[in-house]
Every structure is written in structure tokens, then in C-alpha cells.
Amino acid sequence: MASLKDILSWFEKNDYPTEEQFRESWKSFWHKSERIDQSSVLGLPDALNSKASKEDLANATTNFKGYHTSLAALLAIHPQNENKKDFFAWVGTPYPGTVHKVFADKGAWTDTGEVPTQQEIDLAEYTKRVDLFNNATIPFIADGNGYWTGTVGQPATISTEFEQYRYMNLKHVLPGTLVVWDGFFANAPTSAICALIDSAGNFVKRLNFNGCSNIDYNTGHFEYTMPSNASQIGFFFDINNAAFPIANAKITIGITDESVIKDEVLPTATEIQKGITKLTAAIDDRNDIALSSKAMFDYNNMLFDSGVAPFPFIADGNGYWTGTVGQPVTISTQYPEYRYMNLKQVLPGTLIVWDGFFSTQPTSMLCAFVDNDGNFVKRLNFNECTNINYDTGHYEYIMPSNASQVGFVFNVNGGALFPIANTKITIGKSGKIRIEHINIDAIVEEIGGGSITTGRVLASQSDMFMRGNVSKKYAASTKKKCIIVAGQSNTDGRVPAAQFPSTYVDEGGATVNYLTGGQIPNTKYCKNNLNANFGTWSLGSNRWAYDAIVLSRLQHLLNDTVYEIKWSQGGTAISPNGGDGGGFWTPRFENIPSNKTKLLQNFEQSIRAAIANNPDSFDIKAFLWHQGESDWLAASAPQYYDSLCDVIDYVRGVVGNPILPFIFGTVPHASGQYSSIVEEAMKRVAAQDKYVFMVDMSNGTLLDAYHFDAASSEYLGTKMYEILRDSVL
């Protein structure tokens, strides 16, 4: 073989290569028709030798038992008596915890103290294992009498010809998905078990029992793979055999490898939302990204059963959970009207929502909370919940930090008004972040975005976002421009009406009046009104705040009506450990004393009322805020970072926009309630979220020891307006 140097020398200017030189030149390179031996590729044998074998991958993916927040959570799914040698899992918070291993068959889970590495599991191989798919098992809950039928290619219908049949509403199932029935009665092999229907609602075929696989008529077990020309199933059930009670019927819809694997390994929907929010912070089109982020949020909630996939109350026995605090929980049968469900694992901080639950009185029991060791923590009464509606049986509560299990109970005395079949329980997952291994910055760089600051968004956003957003979805629109405003006394307004400024110079250099006849024209204003009754902003003899400056300048800039929804109350802290002005702003409503106002809940109700009164017509542009003085106390100031994050994220959830711009001002250093700790927390939040904008009010001047004078109020309002003009609109 000739060297490259020799070949080049044969073909220099004025040279005449010989036949032999031509031959040697071509022989020095590989031709496509020739196979290259592995040993001839530099480094390839060593690289291949370092790869895991198929056996190694099979063992890894079989033995890996996922990520669990605690040992108790792991044992609930993989008890010691089912353990095999070499099982391992990731356990503990924050994610990924430490590696726990089993060293002998039926051996205990042992914490090795090792920090997991991503190389321990080949997730691509993991997704191919059918036995680890996140199968969804549901009970058969009848939606009516009859069964699905039809003519091929024509719309499917429900027939009531045979009165023993009960049907369920159509369910979407991906083609190629395995469907499993258990506890279904077949009066004959050729009788029907379901109807298959296409995406247009047209009848595809009737499936008979004998058309299934892995058939067991004695247990009512049948399996079938969804055909390629169908995407919906009409399940029905024959109640003619007492040996097959409808309460025992179960359907398992397997998820194909095109969808999702167990959430013990991959991030939950709330964690994906954090990644989406962090990613979208680098993209400029706010409206588009709010909608796409929201759509992805809803989609992932559906896939991961996180907060929007309710399940019915299925009784496991008669009685209710009770006990003495710190002692093992027990089931009492003292009151025969109660039914109970077996204990369910729920992460602390998780939102639980009940619907269709009957309350004999506000102090009657809704559930019991139990700790990791099975000890009784507390009984939850109906009147301890939030967002209560006794007429519909709707209640909400946050899982306490010292509990990890819930014993749900139901009182059947509600009769026809509250049938047990109509109950729903929604368990939303907490916001513990588990996506550190995803390099979102690299993805943003790949698509041409900018850099993103990490920290705050990953710490808490989706937890509070989902709490505010749960089960309440609103579409964005451009019909009505709206700002929402909240805070304590400097938001409420303390500047006398006589000191309202008269004019300003607009972007075109014209002098413009702030007010016309004592009012801000083209405005719809609502303050501290639960029903969101709007009127024109009027000065009158009232005191005013910075938001009036924003409102006036905004309507002039847009030459259109601008809406404002405002809630404010002087002397109020976010944290219940702060100053007591009669209420608190934290969205952790369970921490607010019962005799104090839940300010953010009132603000939320006002926003929702405005949207309900004007469906699909509000375009909420930004959230304006000034507060912090009442959190200056030693007991609350260190919490201010988390407190402010909670407020921002909750309100973003309420309006359904994870990147809703948040604009706020700091506390003047001259204030008698200035805190450097609170100020540093404010700066930290602003530095970590691209859609948080801070106005520095450190040199602000005051009317008294605490409140802005006219100059400071106009300055803050002007700066907020400029942020809206330059960075939001």
C-alpha cells in the first residue's frame, strides 16, 4: 500500500503517473464492494468490548425497580418477601436519592449510600419491557343500560334490546394496545364483550368472547389487541350471573411503547411542566408558548395520571378509619353507614380533591391521615377543607407533611343525591423535581434560543401552578386586555386624592391628562369584589396607588378598554408567621387560621368570576404586585423567597399561563418595615425567572413611616407601565 505522500507526489504538475502507480493509488483505499474487518477500525474492538452485553442489559432492566421517594413507598410496591437477589432501586429525596440493593432472595432493601448514575439503566431498553408498562386498570362503572352496536362504517349506537346489559361511554385506546378483561360473564362463547369503533365514531366490529386470547371463562379473563382500524372501545357487561358481580369487573388498558413508562422512573407531569416552563423562558412569542406549554401540560397530566385523572370510590369494606395519634390506625364498624377504601400512598404536599361526597354535617369525617409506619395522624373533617361546596360534595385539601397515606371513607346515607357510583377522588402529584439529568439549556441552544437561569423555576413552580390550575382551564384570547393587581397597603393606596398627578408626556411627546372628569377613560375596574362587578376607575375622594398610573397610561397606549382585577388589604403578610393584618396571602390555605382571611383565595374567586362572566374573552397580560413589609418579622422574612414563589406560581395556575409576567416593586429602605432578607429574596426570584420583572424602590420616598408618597407611587406605576410596554405587550 502506497503512502498518501507518495501518491500525491506521482500526480504533481508535469508528472506522468505509470500504470503501476495508478494501480497502487487505487489499491491504497477501501472500495465499497469490500467488507472492512472490525480489527481494521482503530479503537473499535476496545469500544465494543466496553459495551454492556445483551445479558447485562436484560439483567439491569429486569432488576431495576424504579425511583421511590421513600423506603416505605418502595416497600408498598416491592415488599421484601417478593425480592430477588440483585434487585436495586433509587430511593429518597431529592431525586435520585441513593441506590438500595437486595443481596439475597427475599432479602431486605439495603441502602448502599451510593448516588445513582444515569448509566445504571438503559431507559431505551427499559421502555421495551412490556411487564413494566404503566398499565391502567379501571373498574367497570356503568354509564347506562344497553350495549354498543351498529353497522360497519355507520355511526355506533346503543341498543336496549337486552335489558341485562350495562355499557360504559366510549374510551379512546391506541391501536396495537393490549386490552385485558377480568371478572366478565360470558353466557356463551359467541356472545359479545365489546364493540370496536373508529375515530369518527363509526362501528368497526363486534368482539365476541371467543375472539379473544388467553381465555378463562371461570374467572372471566380475556385479552385482545386493539386493531389498527379502531381507536375507541365501547365496553359493556352482562349482569345475569351472580358469580360475576359488576363490582368485581376490571379492565386493564395497556399503554404501548409509543407512550409512557412507569412514573417511578420518568418525571411526572408536574416535573415535565417545570422543564417546559424552563425551556419556554428562552422563546419570545409568549402567546404561542403559553398555549403550547399549556397543551403539553394537559397532555402529560393525562398520561401520568397526575391531578386530572379522578378515580371512583370503590369500597373495600364496611367501616371507617380511626385511631389515636401516634398509635396504629384501625377500622371501626361503629357506624354502619360508612364504607372504607384500603390505605393509599400520597406524597406530602399533594392536593387531594373530593367530588360527590355526602356530608351529614360540617364536622363529620371525610378521611383519615396515616404516617409511614401505619400510625394515625389525624381525622379530616369536611369543614377543614378549602373550596367547599356541600351541594355538589366538592372539597380540597393538601396532604400534611407528617402523613404519607390516606384512608378514604364514604357515608352512604346521602342516598340518591350522593350515590357512591358518582364519587370521584383526584390525587395530584407533588412538585418534587426529578429532571436534573435533562439539559434544557442545551436544548434551547440547539433551537436557537438564549440561556436560561436555573434555580427558582425548578424549585417550586409546578406544585403551586397545578394547585391553582386544577380542573379549571381557560382559553387565551385577545378580546379584552386585562391586568391583575394584588398586595398590601401600598397596593391598596394611601396617597390622598388631592395629590394625584395631572399630566404626563407620552411616547410621541404629547402632554396627556391622567384623568378625564376625575375618571380614567376606557377602563373597567374591579377591586375587592368576589363577583367581579366592573365599573370605571374614579378618583373621587379616594386614596390612590401605583396601579392607577399603569391603567391610565395603558389605555392611552392601546387606545382600547383595559380591565383591572384588584385585591388588596393593608398590613397583610404572605406567611402566617408574618404581620397580622386580618388575612394572609399564602396559597397554602390549610396553614391560615380559620378566623383569618384567605386573601389569595378571594383574589382567585374574583378572577374566576370575571372569566366566568365573560367566557373566553379575557387576555390577562400581567400580574402586578407590591407587598413585603408585613413579612419583615424574624419568623417570616427567611421564608419570603418560597412564599413569593408560591404566590406567583399559584396565580399563574389560576389564569392557566405558566409564564404569566409578574411585575413588582421592592420596599423602600426608608420604610419602618424594610428587611434586607426580604429584599434579597425578591432579587433572587427576579434573577431566576425571565418573566419576573422587579422595580427597584430602595430610594422611594414616603408619606409616613411605611407608605409611598405621590412621587413614589407615580414612579412605580410608570416603571411598571414601561415594562408592560417594552417587554410584555
Image (spheres, rainbow, N blue to C red):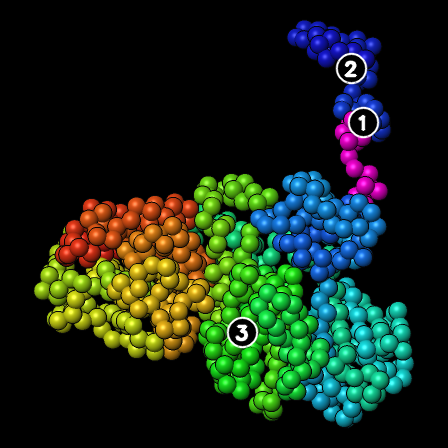
Check disc 2 and report its element: helix, strand or loop.
helix
Q: Earlier in the sequence, mark 1 or mark 2?
A: 2
Comparing 229 with 450, the one in front is: 450
Give residue 181's quadrant in the image: bottom right
Q: Which residue is mark 2?
A: 25
Query: Distance between the Cα atoms at labels 1 and 2?
Result: 28 Å
Dot 2: within a 10 Å radius of its alpha carbon, few (fewer than 14), some, or many (20 or more) residues? some
Q: Position of residue 350 (x, y in %)?
A: 55, 63
Comparing 224 with 605, the one in front is: 605
Check disc 3 and report its element: helix, strand or loop.
strand
Q: Is residue 48 magenta?
A: yes
Query: Distance between the Cα atoms at labels 3 and 1?
Result: 64 Å
Left or right of residue 591, residue 235 in this image: right
Comparing 77 with 545, the one in front is: 77
Q: Which residue is mark 3?
A: 380
Q: Residue at x 77, y 79 (%)?
A: 248
Looking at numbered disc 3 in the image, what kind of residue is underneath it? Leu
Q: Position of residue 617 (x, y in %)?
A: 39, 71
Task: For the residues labelled 1 and 2, say whether their Cβ atoms are less than 8 Å apart.
Answer: no
> In which quadrant will I find the N terminus?
top right
Q: Which residues are magenta?
A: 44-59
Check disc 1 and report its element: helix, strand or loop.
helix
Q: Position of residue 283 (x, y in %)?
A: 45, 49
Q: Earlier in the sequence, mark 3 or mark 1?
A: 1
Q: Is residue 41 magenta?
A: no
> In which quadrant will I find the C terminus?
bottom left
Looking at numbered disc 2 in the image, what kind of residue is underneath it? Ser
Q: Earlier in the sequence, mark 2 or mark 3?
A: 2
